[in-house]
Image (tube, grey):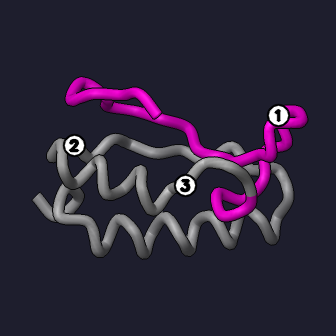
């Protein structure tokens, strides 16, 4: 994953690299736990929009992202 201190915005969804599936952020190859650790390390808190099309997957993603943002030192600043 490559991004730096200038990251201000990202859209989030996940997939298994077979096609652009727009899964929940918890269902696929992107490790969002690691992503938030990098945000904290870099001291960045980008705006995150979701791009998840199925309702239950969207709700799961929003719950997860809200919890990660609440516990992130970057988002508390």
Cβ atoms under marks 1 and 2 closer than 8 Å = no
Q: CA distance from mark 3 to mark 1?
A: 16 Å
Tell me if residue 36 comes above or below residue 55 in the rendering. Answer: above
Could you say where residue 1 lies in the image, as x and y percent from the top left?
46, 34
Q: Which residues are magenta?
A: 1-27
Could you say where residue 56 lies in the image, as x and y percent from the top left?
81, 71
Residue appearing at x 89%, y 36% in the figure: 18
Write down the residue under mark 3.
31
Could you say where residue 50 lies in the image, as x and y percent from the top left?
61, 48
> What type of secondary structure mainly makes up the magenta span?
loop
Could you say where residue 38 lies in the image, as x and y percent from the top left?
30, 48
Point out which mark residue 44 bears.
2
**The furthest residue to the left:** 77
User: Label 3's element?
Assistant: loop
User: Label 2's element?
Assistant: loop
Q: CA distance from mark 1 to mark 2?
A: 26 Å
Point out which mark residue 20 bears.
1
Point out which mark residue 12 bears.
none
């Amino acid at each position: 994953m490559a991004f730096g201190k200038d990251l201000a915005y990202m859209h989030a969804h996940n997939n298994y690299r077979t096609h652009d599936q727009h899964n929940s952020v918890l269902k696929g190859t992107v490790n969002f736990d690691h992503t938030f650790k990098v945000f904290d390390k870099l001291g960045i808190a980008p705006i995150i929009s979701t791009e998840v099309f199925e309702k239950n997957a969207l709700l799961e993603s929003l719950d997860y992202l809200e919890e990660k943002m609440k516990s992130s030192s970057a988002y508390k600043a």
